[in-house]
């Protein structure tokens, strides 16, 4: 046998031996929705300026106008109250009115639940179990993942939660007293590293992203009844980003990254508006936007941050640095970002020019929040870094450690910060903290 042919055969055998068959791709039936078929008589979304009703806050951008937030805290400093959280999860606190809502999962009991707390005191108001058994095994979970990573969305009258259970996605609507209003199976889901996207509310709809390597899709449901309104197919790729509603004068867009592209859809009907190559196969962070520019970043295996024209999808600039797990933030023409490894960047939204680069430290999975002129981001060891939203230079204000582990993004409402963190004291105990300036307590 010629040496070259033998070598090629040997390489082929090695490659075949190393390949593991992926899950069977399950074709998802696309369901279209004309505007005339959209749900009628669904109450409008009703939330206040001081609410944090879903992932990344009212604007879905992680930005609030709060100016007078505390910049220093610790176990005994500027703590308004603290309360124990049963189970574990990476979902951020959702705050509407005088209640805080959290998704959680108890791995020992194999339950997935929604919790409600009093915003003023931290006392538990109710707990509703949604699923028992059926938690994803270790083979389908990343070591850093959780069985309750999706942040709850609230339309002012109902709560919307989604959990991966028994290799299917299940959506539940509850009233504000914890009673189940409806529960629907969104579809099959083949997990590689668990499930991450949070529900997105738009007019009469609640929207769920389900990119997975068994056959991806996005579906929209009637907020009032849970009935399926539209569903679109997506590539059979395991990626984890939550869509964002990008508000434009002509037409609002639903934008999502991952599957080696950034794609925009009509949020009312699911109609494909444009898609542009960029980011990576797998992304986690939610795209950000300001005026008519959208920025997305990823991920794995490629490294790419891309800015696009919202109207056309045209790529305006690329940066070969990437932000994989944390989302980014943008304010007044400047993008602020922190990598998983703790490197901070500031780029010009106009042209992608690097304004500054700094080592912030730590490893990060949570996303930054802009409150007034300050940026907060919590690392995986429970330290929240506060720095200036300053395009000229990196200016650190403080570092505040609370707990031994943290993956949930902080929630900021008024002049209070709400942190979900974990302590290792002979076991894992999650805590919910309300942080405020001591002179105001």
Image (cartoon, rainbow, N blue to C red):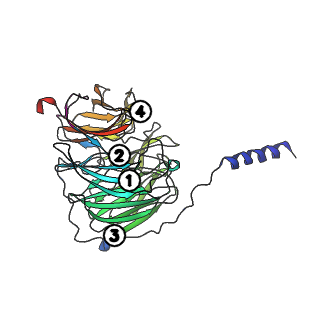
- Distance of label 3 from label 4 (alpha carbons): 41 Å
Residue furthest right as drawn: 1
Q: Mark 4 sits on what residue?
A: 363
Cα–Cα span, label 1 and label 4? 29 Å
Which marked residue is nearer to the observer: mark 1 or mark 3?
Answer: 1
Residue position marked by numbered label 3 in the rendering: 227
Residue 73: within the magenta? Answer: yes
Foreground tag (2 vs 4): 2
Residue 369 % position (x, y): 29, 39
Q: Main secondary structure of the magenta part?
A: loop
Q: Which residues are magenta?
A: 68-81
Q: Residue at x 51, y 60 (%)?
A: 215
Classify mark 3: helix, strand or loop.
loop
Kindly check if marks 2 and 4 are in contact, taking CB atoms under 8 A apart as contact: no
Of pointers 2 and 3, the one earlier in the residue sequence: 2
Whether residues under marks 2 and 1 lie with C-beta atoms below 8 angstroms apart, the answer is: yes
Q: CA distance from mark 2 to mark 3?
A: 30 Å
**Disc 2 and disc 3 in contact, CB within 8 angstroms:** no
Q: Are marks 1 and 4 in contact (CB under 8 Å)?
A: no
Residue 110 picture location, percent across and down: 41, 52
Tell me, yes or no, if residue 243 can be seen here: no
Q: Which residue is mark 2?
A: 87
The CA distance from mark 1 to mark 3 is 25 Å
The local secondary structure at tag 1 comes to strand
Give the residue at mark 1: 111
Q: Position of residue 58 (x, y in %)?
A: 24, 49
């Amino acid at each position: 046998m010629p040496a070259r042919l033998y070598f090629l055969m040997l390489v082929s055998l090695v490659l075949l031996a190393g390949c593991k068959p992926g899950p069977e791709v399950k074709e998802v039936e696309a369901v279209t929705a004309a505007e005339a078929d959209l749900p009628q008589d669904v109450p409008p979304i009703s939330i206040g300026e001081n609410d944090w009703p879903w992932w990344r806050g009212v604007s879905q951008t992680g930005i609030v106008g709060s100016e007078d937030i505390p910049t220093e805290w610790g176990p005994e400093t500027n703590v308004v109250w603290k309360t124990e959280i049963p189970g574990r999860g990476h979902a951020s606190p959702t705050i509407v009115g005088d209640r805080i809502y959290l998704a959680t999962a108890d791995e020992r009991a194999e339950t997935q639940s929604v919790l409600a707390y009093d915003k003023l005191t931290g006392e538990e108001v109710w707990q509703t179990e949604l699923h028992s058994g059926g938690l994803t095994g270790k083979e389908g979970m990343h070591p850093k993942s959780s069985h309750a990573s999706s942040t709850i969305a609230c339309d002012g009258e109902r709560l919307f939660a989604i959990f991966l259970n028994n290799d299917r996605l299940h959506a539940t609507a509850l009233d504000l007293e914890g009673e189940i209003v409806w529960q629907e199976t969104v579809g099959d889901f083949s997990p590689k590293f668990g499930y991450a996207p949070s529900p997105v509310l738009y007019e009469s709809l609640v929207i769920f992203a389900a990119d997975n390597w068994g056959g991806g899709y996005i579906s929209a449901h009637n907020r009032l009844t849970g009935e399926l309104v539209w569903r679109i197919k997506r590539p059979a790729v395991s990626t984890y980003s939550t869509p964002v509603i990008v508000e434009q004068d002509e037409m609002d867009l639903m934008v999502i990254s991952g599957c080696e592209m950034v794609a925009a859809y009509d949020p009312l009907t699911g109609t494909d508006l444009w898609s542009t190559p960029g980011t990576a196969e797998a992304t986690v962070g939610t795209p950000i936007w300001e005026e008519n520019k959208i920025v997305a970043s990823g991920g794995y295996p490629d490294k790419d941050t891309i800015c696009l024209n919202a109207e056309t999808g045209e790529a305006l600039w690329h940066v070969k640095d990437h932000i994989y797990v944390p989302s980014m933030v943008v304010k007044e023409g400047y993008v602020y970002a922190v990598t998983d490894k703790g490197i901070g960047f500031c780029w010009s939204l106009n042209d992608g020019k690097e304004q500054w680069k700094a080592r912030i430290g730590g490893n990060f999975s949570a996303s930054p929040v802009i409150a007034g002129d300050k940026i907060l981001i919590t690392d995986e060891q429970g330290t929240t870094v506060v720095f200036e939203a300053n395009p000229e230079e990196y200016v650190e204000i403080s570092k505040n450690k609370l707990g031994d582990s943290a993956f949930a993004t902080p929630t900021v409402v008024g002049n209070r910060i709400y942190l979900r963190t974990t302590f290792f004291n002979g076991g894992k105990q999650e805590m919910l903290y309300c942080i405020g300036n001591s002179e105001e307590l």
